[in-house]
Amino acid sequence: MNEGIRRMLDVQVLDQELDKLDKDHKLLKDEVDKLEAEYARRKKILAAMATQTTELAKRRAALELDEKTAEEAIKQTTRRMEMVKNARELEALNHQMEAARATLGNLDEQLLTLMDEEEQLQKRDHDGRESTTRFTHKAKAEKARLEKLMADNRQLAEGIKLDRARAEARVDEKNREVYDWLRQKQRLLPVRPLQGEACGGCGSLLPPGVVAQIVVNEEPMQCPQCNNFLYSEK
Ligand SMILES: [Zn+2]
């Protein structure tokens, strides 16, 4: 194999390892992001439930106050009934009493519904908190595990980058420029094996003269279509 190609292949192998590490690192980061998003989602639900609990308590306090007022009205009407002077007055007081009792009944009903709501909310809040505590405990350990893997991954990548710098220093400057340009442009592998009489990069058929030169391999050859460097595996 042509020496220039071989040296570029050395760089390319390291680039492939770096690409793989970068991809793994991104997947690990996604996992951490997912854990954090789930934690934020749970916190938001708990905060909403806390707000709702406060609102229900306020509504209950207001209803209880209304209830006291209604009870007071009934007491007053009862007292006035004891001192009633004529049938017309009694009838009017009876009406008042009926209305006050209806109001009280209505308030009682509202209070019962509200207390039911409070009870359900309290249960959901309690379950949510317990489940979030369990989740947080597990997520913390999982996050630490992922972050350790990410740190190991970066350490490995740093070592490979040093190897790559050494391998790259052995590549001709002209080839290096083309290699880097191809890698940036295509984000793929710039050095490809010949596939029959076609380019291993873009697949286009190569002129027989070019194929022959690649097989002889006296100098690094490039595909006229995609510019990838080509070599023969024979
Ligand atoms: Zn090509």
Image: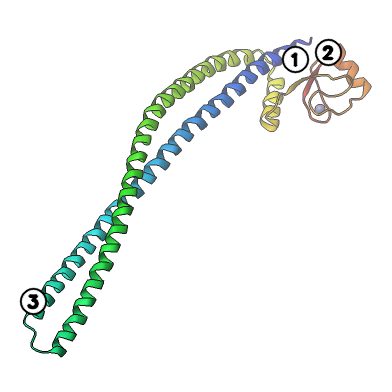
Q: Tell whether label 1 touches label 3 (CB within 8 Å).
A: no
Q: Colour scheme in the image? A: rainbow
N-terminal-most mark, 3 or 2: 3
User: What distance separates the C-alpha of mark 2 from that of mark 1?
Assistant: 9 Å
Residue 71 drawn above or below residue 203: below
For ligand 1, tell me if the residue under mark 1 lies within 8 Å: no
Q: Percent from the top left, x then y, of residue 122?
A: 31, 46
N-terminal-most mark, 3 or 1: 1
Check disc 3: other Cα within 10 Å, few if <14, some if 14-19, many if 20+: few
Q: Which residue position is annotated with label 1?
A: 5
Check disc 2: other Cα within 10 Å, few if <14, some if 14-19, many if 20+: some
Q: Quadrant of ligand 1?
A: top right
Q: Give the residue displayed 61% in from the left and 23% down from the top.
A: 19
Q: Which residue position is annotated with label 3?
A: 79
User: What distance separates the C-alpha of mark 3 from that of mark 1?
Assistant: 110 Å
Near-viewer residue (149 or 83): 83
Q: Give the residue displayed 25% in from the left and 71% down from the top.
A: 103
Classify the position of the N terminus by image quarter.
Answer: top right
Q: Tell whether label 1 touches label 2 (CB within 8 Å).
A: yes
| Amino acid type for the residue under numbered disc 3 | Arg
N-terminal-most mark, 2 or 1: 1
Residue 110 drawn above or below residue 176: below
Check disc 1: other Cα within 10 Å, few if <14, some if 14-19, many if 20+: many
Is 82 left or right of 35, judged from the image as shown?
Answer: left
Q: Which residue position is annotated with label 2?
A: 217
Q: Disc 3 or disc 2, which is closer to the eye?
A: 3
Classify the position of the C terminus by image quarter.
Answer: top right
Near-viewer residue (154 or 231): 154
Q: Is label 2 in a helix, a strand or a loop?
A: loop
User: What distance separates the C-alpha of mark 3 from that of mark 2?
Assistant: 117 Å
Q: Disc 3 or disc 1, which is closer to the eye?
A: 3
